[in-house]
Image (spheres, rainbow, N blue to C red):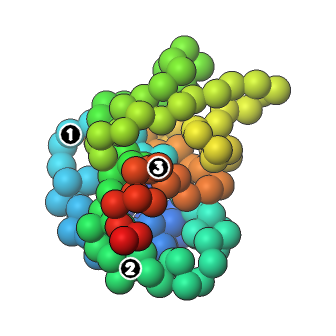
Amino acid sequence: MANILETASQSGDFTVLLKAIKATELEDTLNSEGSFTVLAPTDDAFAKLPQAERDALFDNLPKLKRIVLYHAVMGNVQSDDLAEIDEAPTVEGSVLAIKRGEGKVRINDALVTQMDILADNGVIHKIDTVLMPAILEHEYDE
């Protein structure tokens, strides 16, 4: 089985996320043996952001790194686990809210569109929205 980055690359749905991981030099972390859960926004999720905002993210690597780390949770949190928890601490340091209803799972405001994409060192859950830590709006916009 492939690791998280190889699995994401093979999918073809995560080219912008993989570009962000590379730009922020997080490849070694996500290639490590540790067990990770990645809440992976698709390319369509990134396309929902205005082009100027996407460009600004790649021009501000500290902010981009925080956003990428906000999409990662330590440990292998699969769909069965998501059904039983209401929040998950991110590698970035913030906490994500997990909501369930009508047969769907939401992470903050993002809909999980595919669960349990398994990898050697964890699991990927595909989401339809880029998650933004609330604190970033105040730290980097000054």
User: Residue 36: where, in percent of width, then height?
Assistant: 32, 40
Write down the residue under mark 1. Answer: 34
Q: Is residue 2 visible?
A: no
Q: Which mark is residue 58?
A: 2
Q: Amino acid at mark 3?
A: Ala
Q: Amino acid at mark 1?
A: Gly
Query: Few, some or many C-alpha atoms within 10 Å of disc 2 (few <14, some 14-19, many ≥20)?
Result: some
* Residue that numbered label 3 is attached to: 134
Secondary structure of residue under mark 2: helix
Q: Earlier in the sequence, mark 3 or mark 1?
A: 1
Q: Residue at x 34, y 60 (%)?
A: 139
40 relative position to 68: left or right: right
- The residues bearing labels 3 and 1 have C-alpha atoms spaced at a distance of 27 Å
From the viewer's perspective, is residue 92 above or below residue 128? above
> In the drawing, does residue 137 fall left or right of residue 103?
left
* Mark 1 crowdedness (10 Å alpha carbons): few <14, some 14-19, many ≥20: few
Q: Secondary structure at mark 1?
A: loop
